[in-house]
Image (spheres, rainbow, N blue to C red):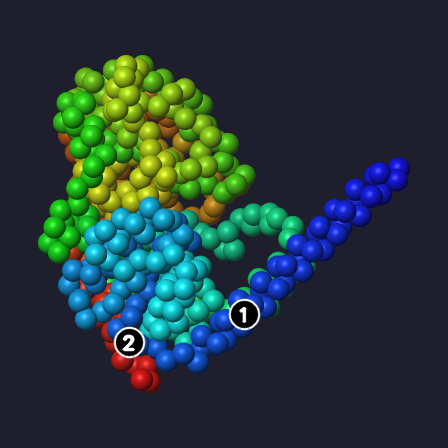
Amino acid sequence: MNQRKTTRVKLLLQAWLLSLGELAVAVATRTIYLISGFVPRRKNIWIFGSWDGKKFADNPKYLFLYIHHKQPEITGVWLSRNKTILADLRASGNKAYYMHSLRGILYSMRASCIIFSVGVSDVNLYTTKGTKSVQLWHGTPLKKFPAQGRQTPMRRSSYARRLIDEGLRPNKNYDVVIATSDESKQTMKTVFNDAREIAVTGYPRNDGLLGAPWLNKLDDEYVRRIKREVDFQFLFLYVPTYRQEASRELDLFTRYGFEADTVNQTLRELGAILIIKTHLYFRARPYDGHADPDSDGAGFERIFTLSDEDLPDIYPLLRETDVLITDYSSVFFDYLLLDRPIVFAPFDIQQYITADRELFYDYDQVTPGPKAKDWPDVLRLLREAVEKDSWKAERREVCARFNKFKDSNNSERVFQVICRLLEQTNP
């Protein structure tokens, strides 16, 4: 009994010390935030980041590259937590620093604006007082946010952590949020109802999809590796959407009739390969193993699996894709710009809408392509897609609704919006 009491006291003491430490960090970071508001800002220093500082991807990546190639008067600085990303960017002549390094903090304190794809934590959150915030986001809204749809259980947190989140953490209302069309702008207004402006510019990442000349050529090294090993005519890409924690054990393969031998044989007949791009959390895989073009004797030479870690930026791969397969991922709105076939695979749509995320739109009204109920159905529809593309009119209608611009000048438009925003700021 005494030993149990001693253990309990130790645990309580550890919890108390942890809460005290969190509170100290919260006070220190809040102090830095307040101090950063007194540092003079320079209009030609812009800070970029993406996905909590863990990826060089998405809309901030392409706007950053545009600035580097086309607007040399702007000092673009990429912040990251990933040392490999930082090394690669520096080797290419870019300014890139660890998010909480001295240089990262100093540049953040002098910057006039911060540019991100998820939230302010993509950059250095606690040096942003006095900056303009530009939310580039990461997809045309199809799915409602948890706050608008299903509520997901929140983990219990300490008193100090709640205090950080609710009181000491700086509140950042976005100065600009971008959208791809007037239709998506209306949806964005419900998502970012405190944004000061929602600008219809198109997404910078689609400049890469449409071959912007300032990017030279988006070369997908992964596809080139496969081409050295496998002769193929068509590339099929399966991109299932992100699931909430409650759905992460979902098997989207075996449960819905994915038989690797049959899939591989069908791909061989069609002269095709299938790349499956999953999120890191997916436990279920299409088969027990990994068909890698560098491995010897891969059993299914035409099936390849990738995670976010393998390929943080999907857009070079998307540009090479002949037929997209997806369920509820909003990436298809961008893919419509290429006017290529899409096979929709909403295997679990009722469960998804009920237990995971509600949708802004009637699914059938905004998904211009055939719907598959399982993997045998997907294979049949893939064969039809390469033999006869019968959904062109529907795709173009939905594309016009959700993509106002079909050029490769989205980054230029976003750049002009930011310049106008900064011109409104007192020097």
* Quadrant of the rendered image containing residue 125: bottom left
Q: Does residue 181 appear in this view? A: no
- Which residue is at the front of the view, 409 or 43? 43
The image position of residue 33, as x and y in percent, is: 49, 71
Q: In this picture, is 201 found above or below 343?
A: below
Can you say whether 34 is above or below 25 in the image? below
- Residue 81: image tag: none
Q: Secondary structure at mark 2?
A: strand
Rate crowding at label 1 as few (under 14), some (14 to 19) or many (20 or more) other CA atoms within 10 Å: many
Query: Mark 2 — residue?
Result: 43
- Mark 2 → mark 1, Cα distance in angstroms: 24 Å
Determine which residue is flagged by label 1: 30
Q: Earlier in the sequence, mark 2 or mark 1?
A: 1
Q: In the image shown, does 60 or 108 lie closer to the viewer? A: 108
Farthest residue, direction right: 1
Q: Where on the picture, by quarter, is residue 38?
A: bottom left
Kind of residue sitting beneath label 1 = Arg
Left or right position of 229 against 309: left
On-image quarter of the N terminus: top right
- Describe residue 95's horizontal placement relative to residue 351 as left or right: left
| Residue in view at x 38 percent, y 56 percent | 98
Residue type, numbered disc 2 = Lys
Residue at 15% x, 23% y: name it. Answer: 231
